[in-house]
Each structure stands twice: as C-alpha cells, then as structure tokens.
Amino acid sequence: MFPIYDDVPTKKFPLITVALIVLNSIVYLYQVSLGERFAEFIYSMGLLPFEITHHIDLFPSG
C-alpha cells in the first residue's frame, strides 16, 4: 500500500515530481495522437541495446 499522507509536513513543493508527471503526460498524449504513425515514432526515437553497445546508428541521418 502507498501512503496517502504523512504526519511530518513537507517544507517544499515537489516541483521535480510534478514536472516529471507533466512531461510524461505530454509524451503519452503525443503518442496517442500519432495513430498509425506510432510505430514509426517508436522506431525513430527508440534505441536498441545492440546499437548502444556497438556504437552504430545512434543518430540516424535523414
């Protein structure tokens, strides 16, 4: 179970946490809006472990 609140109040606003949630939501909504171009987006923006370990095709041209 995850705690909903704590007896010790926080002193700062969780800016980084909120920023990460907003950024992830924006990326998710962008991916959903792609429709049929989703696979192309994943292929062009994703990295394969083989490409990372062998230093090939990290930044495709074109």
Image: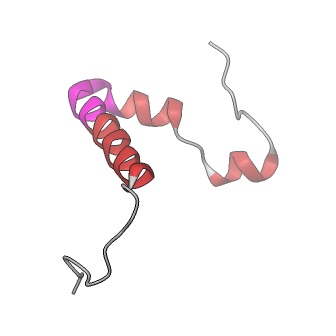
Q: Quadrant of the C terminus?
A: top right
Q: How many marks?
A: 0
Q: Quadrant of the N terminus?
A: bottom left
Rendered image coloring scheme: secondary structure
The quarter of the picture where residue 3 lies is bottom left
Residue 31 falls within the magenta-colored stretch: yes
Looking at the picture, tell me which residue is in the foreground, 31 or 18: 18
Q: Which residues are magenta?
A: 29-38
In this picture, is 34 found above or below 29?
above
In this picture, is 54 found above or below 28?
below
Report the residue at 40% width, 48% height from top. 20
Looking at the picture, tell me which residue is in the foreground, 54 or 6: 6
Q: x and y percent of residue 38 in the render?
A: 32, 31
Residue 24 falls within the magenta-colored stretch: no
Q: x and y percent of residue 44 in the render?
A: 52, 29
- Left/right placement of residue 12 relative to residue 49 reads left
In this picture, is 1 found above or below 60?
below
Report the residue at 66% width, 24% height from top. 60
By secondary structure, the bulk of the magenta-drawn segment is best described as helix
Q: x and y percent of residue 54 in the render?
A: 80, 48
